[in-house]
Amino acid sequence: MQFSKIKTIKLFIIIILGCLLFGRCNTRDVYTNVDLDKAIESAKKRDKKLLFIATINGCSPCNTIQKKIAENDTLKSALKDYLVVVYSGDITNLSLANKIIGQIKSPATIVFNKMHSVENVVFGFKNVNDYLYKIQNINISDFEKSRINMLLKVTVDIKRNNRLSQRQFEELRAVDPSFFNLFLLFKNSMLSKQYKRAQIYAKECVLKQNNFTNILYNKEILEIKNFKPINN
């Protein structure tokens, strides 16, 4: 019995030393909504740039997260440093998602609607590929996944490089030509600061794409200093 205790203590010490030496203790990527502040802190430490917030109709943690953001100025300030993606799990819950977006005021924000089988969790991801790996089990079509992928890449590129590349425009056009045209009209309206017109095009993206995607871009995303639009 005594020998077993000694072995346990030794093992515990080895684990602690391993964590201290190799930094492997805090590798968790998934947090419940009520642990949003922990997710932010982890994202800071691990150089993550993308945060994912899921909201499900009738879920109390979703209301908790909205209240927490509203009441915490430090948290709101921290969220501004990230590309924030909010999923509304049900069309009736979109208003709650919009409330969360309103509280965050991130330079780049996207809301995707009509997602299914999404857990009430917050993710912090370093890049889009990490994010896509996590959504493989979500019940959506490959086509819808490809659209999510493209929109995220486009948005991340704007935030990182202050421009959209010609390659990304071509990729977006290949994924969904009709959506691309609406997106282009939306982008040009934003660049010319015609925000009401841009809002109309954003809504058209929703109405004409089977009510799948609702994109809410804060106007600051395309007003980044030295933004270099490509003429298309």
Image: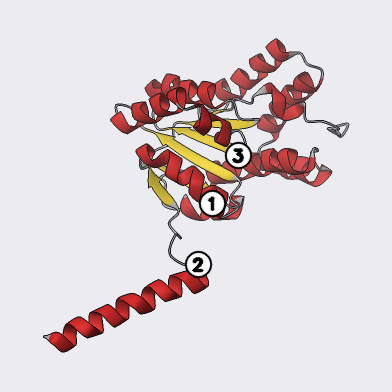
Q: Quadrant of the C terminus?
A: top right
Q: In whole angstroms, how far apart are the C-alphas of marks 1 and 3?
A: 17 Å
Circle 1 sits in a helix, a strand or a loop, which is it?
A: helix
At label 2, counting other C-alpha atoms closer than 10 Å, the crowd grade (few under 14, some 14-19, many 20 or more) is: few
Left/right of residue 218 with respect to residue 165 in the rendered view? left
Horizontal arrangement in the rendering, residue 151 relative to residue 28 (left or right) = right
Q: Which residue is mark 1?
A: 132
- Foreground label between 1 and 2: 2
Q: Nearer the viewer, mark 1 or mark 3?
A: 3
Q: Earlier in the sequence, mark 1 or mark 2?
A: 2
Residue at 65% of width from left, 16% of height from top? 199
Q: Mark 1 or 3 closer to N-term?
A: 3
Residue furthest to the left: 1
**Residue at the disc numbered 3:** 82
Q: Nearer the viewer, residue 177 or 169?
A: 169
Please state the horizontal and vertical placement of residue 206, each as a whole percent of the image: 56, 24
Label 2 near label 1: C-beta < 8 Å? no
Q: Residue furthest top?
A: 196
Q: Where residue 218 sits in the image (x, y, percent)? A: 64, 24
Whole-Å distance between the Cαs marked 1 and 2?
25 Å
Q: Residues within 10 Å of mark 3 (few under 14, many from 20)?
A: many
Q: CA distance from mark 2 to mark 3?
A: 23 Å
Query: Which of the image's four quarters has the N terminus?
Result: bottom left
Residue 150, given in percent of the width and then of the height, sits at 65, 43
Q: Secondary structure at mark 2?
A: loop
Instruction: Specify whether residue 53 is in view.
Output: yes
Query: In the rendering, at what x and y percent does residue 224 appear?
Result: 78, 30
Is tag 2's residue or tag 3's residue first in the polypeptide sequence? Answer: 2
Q: Which residue is mark 2?
A: 23
- The relative height of residue 29 versus residue 75 in the rendered view (above or below) is below
